[in-house]
Amino acid sequence: MNIIVTTSPDKDDLATLSVGIGQFNQDFLPDNVGFEKDTKFAVFAKDNKGNVLGGIRANAFWNYCIIELLWLSEDSRGLGVGSQLINAAESFAKEKGFEYMRTETLSFQAKPFYEKLGFKQFGELADYPKGHTTYCLVKAL
């Protein structure tokens, strides 16, 4: 057996992992949950010239939509753009049948913003990254 660490994994090797965990999960999850495909999507805010002012990168599977990141340009902060992006992501997730949305945010980022939009903290990781706290948040859709 060889143990290999790589920063450029082969797509077929990654697919083998996905199929393997899917087969393992089959005994524990209903078929429509254990084998559904990931739904990757993005939501963008653009100006009239097509420049990106902010956006969300998300991935959804099982019954959860996960906001991987949300970014706003300096000029678009405090104008309600972030709330509009979240609302659009939530609408898309609901249309696709997802029941929850979750995300993580750092102590110097947007925890009050998410809480204002109905997200609840369910966990935290102290000193991650070093000197900061990561907050885990969830919202029922």
Image (tube, rainbow, N blue to C red):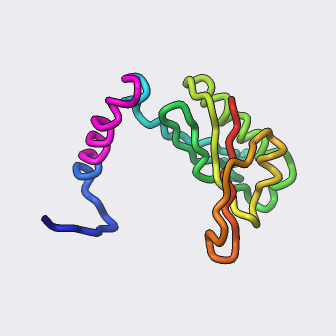
Residue at the image position 77 percent from the left and 55 percent from the top: 111
Q: Is residue 113 above or below residue 8?
A: above
Quarter of the N terminus within the rendering: bottom left
Res. 51 in view: no
- Please give left or right for residue 27 compared with residue 129 in the image: left
Q: Residue furthest front?
A: 28
Residue at the image position 32 percent from the left and 30 percent from the top: 26
Along the line of sight, which residue is nearer the eye, 125 or 60?
Answer: 125
Q: Is residue 30 magenta?
A: yes
- Please give left or right for residue 9 compared with residue 69 in the image: left
Residue at the image position 40 percent from the left and 33 percent from the top: 37
Residue at the image position 78 percent from the left and 42 percent from the top: 83
List x then y, in percent, for residue 72: 73, 55
Quarter of the C terminus within the rendering: top right
Res. 127 in view: yes
List x then y, in percent, for residue 122: 68, 48
Along the line of sight, which residue is nearer the eye, 123 or 112?
Answer: 123
Along the line of sight, which residue is nearer the eye, 1 or 47?
Answer: 1
Q: Residue furthest bottom?
A: 131
Q: Which residues are magenta?
A: 15-31
Give the mark count.
Answer: 0
List x then y, in percent, for residue 2: 16, 67
- Please give left or right for residue 83 compared with residue 22 in the image: right
The dominant secondary structure in magenta is helix
Q: Is residue 111 magenta?
A: no
Q: Residue furthest right?
A: 78
Q: Is residue 13 above or below residue 108?
A: above
